[in-house]
Image (spheres, rainbow, N blue to C red):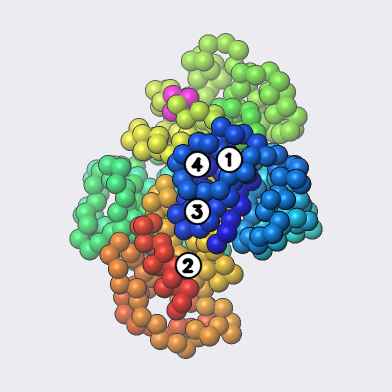
Amino acid sequence: MDVIIAGAGRVGFRLAKTLSLKHNVTVIDKNANALEKLQETIDILTICGDIENPETFKVLSDNSFDIFIAVTDNDEINILSTLITDDIINVKRKIIRLRNRYFAKSSIANKLGIDDAVFPFASTAHSVKSLLEFPKANNVKDFIFTKFKLISVQITNSKSDVEYLELLNSKKAVVVGYEREKSFFIPRKRDTIKQNDLIYIFGETDTIKELCSSLDTQNPKELKKIAIFGAGILGIEIAKALLNNKVEIKIIEKDPKLCKKASEQLQDKAMVINSKYIEDSIYEEEKIKNADMIIATSNEDEENIIKCLEAKEYGVKKTVAINNNIELYYLMHKLGIVAVRGPKSNAYYSILEKIGSSSIIAEKHYCGGRGTIFMRKIFPNSPLIGKSVKPLKLDDTLSFYIREEVIFDFYDKITLKEGDVIVVFIKSYLEEKVKDWIYNL
């Protein structure tokens, strides 16, 4: 494919690096230093210019492109750049990154001819909100073709009498990956459970909750008192997502202007605390030590880690750090801190998943991008109905099919029925092989 990326910031850089492995990529930005850094790292075409200026795009007007992706930090610039491409370039598909949640609820994106929009701040807030339903979990993922979910939970029950991962499997839930000492594995038969493993379970909600309760004995059983450090855009977005869940919310912020803005936006439904005094005293004086969960929302991962460690010292059981730098993801896990993708990581993975998905196939990434999920649903009138299909037999893959809300191992030939969902969990290095297989069933 031929791809244009507008914006050479952290998200644009990562997308360019990933997509350039298989596609022709052009990156446009007015920051010459950022473009030079890109060219030193990967083989791409760069154009130095203002993406708000139509003149910047005229050099590309004679060519056709498969995808245009706008990923600057500014909503207005991203929207304007897509309008300009409509006039000057022949582009089949447009994907845009937006911060303002208003656009998610309106039809503006459709009216502007934008095919896909990603809302990374809202996605990060949704990830935190999902922890209320699964208080023992580290992460929760939803899917469009099934009500089943994928969660990760850390093994903290040293008295568990289950020795092998496969013994946790049932018709309603299966273990589809585990992380141990920085390494990610797709489970094989007779793989054992070890203390502090982070395991990934796919399945029905109630069954997963029961498994989580038996595997994790440290995190609270419910989350009713929440403390959020930071009243920036993300902190407010998370607070808004949690408001209707009958929880008590406290927001701690140093900047008085942000405190005032937070109070206005949340309409006094959350307590906003301006921490002008010594940080440590907050835990005692404002009863933050009684929180069931604290969330550190800074753009700096190191600051988030410190906030979580402070909270642990005061007895807070569940601590969540927004993870912006993948290099610190493993450290967070090692310290017993829940790592939730920050907005920039969410934008990166959401866009990759949009590109890799279609109306019948969904693609998702898990375990810091080291695992990939492909899911194909058999819709009415599908040519696959009644067709016999052989399973995919590769190392580092697990294949299942869901039929009438029951999970079956896909290890032998099956005859597909309407409503079936084929699900494959893999290590990400196999993406191209598995994608080719599932698209060509």
Question: Could you give the CA–CA distance between mark 2 and mark 4, rounded to whole angstroms?
Answer: 35 Å
- Between 277 and 350, the one lying in front of the other is 350
Question: Could you give the CA–CA distance between mark 4 and mark 1, rounded to whole angstroms?
Answer: 11 Å
CA neighbours of label 4 inside 10 A, class few (<14), some (14 to 19), many (20+): some
Pinpoint residue 328: horizontal percent, then vertical percent.
Answer: 40, 34
Dot 3 amino acid type:
Leu
Q: Which mark is residue 39?
A: 4
Dot 2 amino acid type:
Met
Up-down: is 64 above or below 151?
below
- Chain-order first, disc 4 or disc 1: 1
- Between 218 and 179, the one lying in front of the other is 179
Which residue lies at the image location 46% right of the left edge and 77% below the top edge? 440
- Between 122 and 313, the one lying in front of the other is 122
Residue ID for mark 1: 8
- Chain-order first, disc 2 or disc 4: 4
Mark 2 or 4: in front is 4
* Residue 254 in the figure: left or right of residue 374: right
Residue 278 is one of the magenta-drawn residues = no
Q: Quadrant of residue 239?
A: top right
Residue ID for mark 2: 375
Up-down: is 193 above or below 283?
below
